[in-house]
Amino acid sequence: MSDYNFAYLDEQTKRMIRRAILKGLAIPGYQVPFASREMPMPYGWGTGGVQVSAAALTPDDTLKVIDQGADDTTNAVSIRKFFERTAGVATTEETEKASIIQTRHRIPEATLREDQIIVYQVPIPEPLRFLEPRETETRKMHALEEYGLMHVKLYEDISQHGSIATSYAYPVKVEGRYVMDPSPIPKFDNPKMEMAAIQLFGAGREQRIYAVPPYTKVVSLDFEDYPFEATKADHACDLCAAEDSYLDEVIMDDAGGRMFVCSDTDYCRARREAGHVGRLGSDAPLTTGPEAA
Amino acid sequence: MQSLLQVNNIQKMYGHRIGCTDVSFDLYPGEVMGIVGESGSGKSTLLNCLAGHLEPDAGEVIFDTRDRGPVDTVTMSEPERRMLSRTDWAFVHQHARDGLRMSVSAGGNIGERLMAVGDRHYGQIRDRAVDWLDRVEIEESRVDDRPTAFSGGMQQRLQIARNLVTGPRLVFMDEPTGGLDVSVQARLLDLLRGLVREMGLSAIIVTHDLAVVRLLADRLMVMKSGHVVETGLTDQVLDDPQHAYTQLLVSSVLQV
Amino acid sequence: MTASHTPMIDIQNVCKSFTLHNQGSATIPVMEGATLSVSPGECVGLVGASGAGKSTLMRLIYGNYLAASGHILIGGLDVAQAEPREILELRRKTLGYVSQFLRVVPRVSTLDVVAEPLLSVGTPVEKARDRAASLLAQLNIPERLWSLSPTTFSGGEQQRVNIARGFAYDYPAMLLDEPTASLDAQNRATVLGLIETAKARGAAIIGIFHDESAREQVCDRFIDVSAFSPKVAA
């Protein structure tokens, strides 16, 4: 037991955040303002996600934290340790065993279940922000469903790159109503957002919470003649030979050597344990990610 | 004939100072009305009240909508008014950068209104953008350039294309040729005149340039200190001005 | 020809004065009790000394000057009291005016300047341009000039462009201000021919001609506008 209140935040704050979460679930994709607290970590480290997780955690939960798919990078390790100390909850690296998964920029490869919650860390919750700097105006645009501007961004992509070059934070329309920023996940993950688990999004610096309830329709915006495509590197994982997972490219040396590995470290590990071997699988170390490379 | 716009007793005060007061007129389909007056005469205030950018303190601005017939746009719901300003209305600003998205390509600028009303076919949107560039005499090869790379005259023509692409019925223009050099002005005026005739547009043009209204406007409204002092057929007001202020205005134009 | 008895142009008791507000509010009366009528197919010449008010009367009829009182009925519309849009409609479809000066948007080609009256009543572009081309040819404007703006033309050429423009559309009523002035014999004959044709199709015409033989050739009768000069108050 620690000297902290359970999950660091005081009970009133957690209540306030839960109310925001419930409102977000009731209006899928709508950005609910909330009184974001100072957390013992800098903005940009996932303060929004941490507050949402703190409000959602119960002592019986098992927490998993990933950063770009990896369980063992600095951000993921610190947040996991933060909750181990302040909430005393069990933690895991296995997607299957987690009841709450806090993530930065990825959705795990394993299909999520109804008894799971995934919490996204969001840097900039407003999908219209880069085209329209005024908050008063973007709120009005959401209220009146004026989303033409979102397509202007995609139009610009095609006119400049020949295809929709937006590859992460790809805007989606939720349940036919609100256009939402799915946080900077790769667009490869967009189709997974129609899932059984509850999806919560927290933006600490911007003080916004939004949510997607289970089995909600999430459509990636596109043009009739340039339909949405969930793309990934055209390779198999060099460690576990998976062809259906999102890959990170790792530079090996100064001579152009490189390898592609699953960004979801838990998925990759499970496959290797099951006997799958990729191109470089036999002599590669069992941990991956930036530290390993 | 049903008037397209019916303005009744519009008033806008800035504290105790009069912005404009007691302005009434009817605008019919295909008519171009000029509003002239010196700086501070209330003409821009009036234009902004008519276009829904400013809320008048009193009066009605009744527009003949496509689906519901005549509706007062002052009391109309905001979504409806915003929809109007994206479809049946257009607003050409004096400074092109107020009316353009400077960080978006020419094609994207023109396409925005189309996408705002639901067009979702890239190829078709782009074709229409190119067609409109041609109509405002900008080369097709500039379609992916940003307006920051355009000259002042080109920016203004791009702004016009961006506004007219959805086939509006009423165009508000605030000094559309202001700040352009005269050769560019002439080209723009010629272009506007052609578009007004081809598309059967109605327009309200605010300017202090009497040469502009003589060429573009069918009718004229002369404003001074927030009041309308004279209205009438453009050439009649300019050639046979009745009010002292109009006579002063007309006689003050430098001859070339 | 359908010479009806109802006049096309009917002017009753028109008065006009100018008030110069910025010059001590001086009021200058220029016309009083002007009355005349013109039937379809008829051409009436205005005569009178220079400054007697011939051009002023023309401008009053065209709605360019605002009449102080009286009625100016053109095809049933009272120009003295009509709304601007009614006058514009009248100018598009009923009343043509060939003034002495050409006023056009710079940069517009001569062919389009001439075709414009037809375009404004909805004539298809090709047809309007054909008609314009035929008029310009009749008036001896060289074809190489058609694509240029008339603003750079000589005075005589500008005048002929102006006449072509004025005759492009078949107006039921026409005002002609010195249409033959400073034209050579050949072009003068062409213009008089255009006037004869217009009369023959039933146009009611009021004209100012300084050229006496032209006047005699096309006018059916004359009206001396000196009769409408304001009487000097005793």
Image: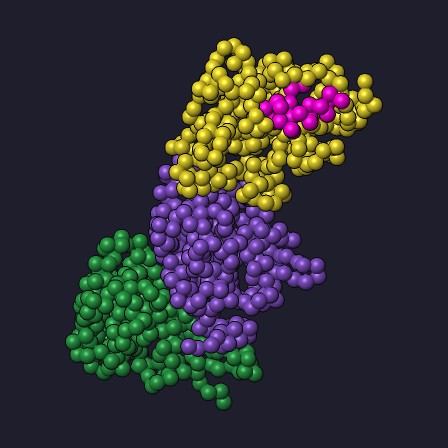
Q: Is residue C83 visible?
A: no
| A22 w.r.t. A155: above or below | above
Which residues fall within the magenta stretch? Answer: A63-85
Image spot of residue B248 (x, y percent):
53, 75
Percent x, y of residue C103: 35, 70
Q: Nearer the viewer, residue C62 or A157?
A: A157
Relative horizontal placement of residue B197, taking residue A79 as reference (left or right): left
Residue that sits furthest to the left in the current view:
C186
Chain ID, purple in image: B
Q: Is residue A204 left or right of residue A11?
A: left
Q: Of residues A112 and A141, which is closer to you in this image?
A: A112
Quadrant position of residue C186: bottom left
- Residue furthest right in the image: A3
Q: Quadrant of residue C194?
A: bottom left
The chain drawn in green is: C
Residue A164 relative to residue C107: left or right: right
Colour assigned to chain A in the rendering is yellow
What residue is drawn where x is 27% and y is 66%?
C148
* Residue C105 location (% of width, % of height): 36, 66
Look at the image and tell me whether residue C191 can be seen.
yes
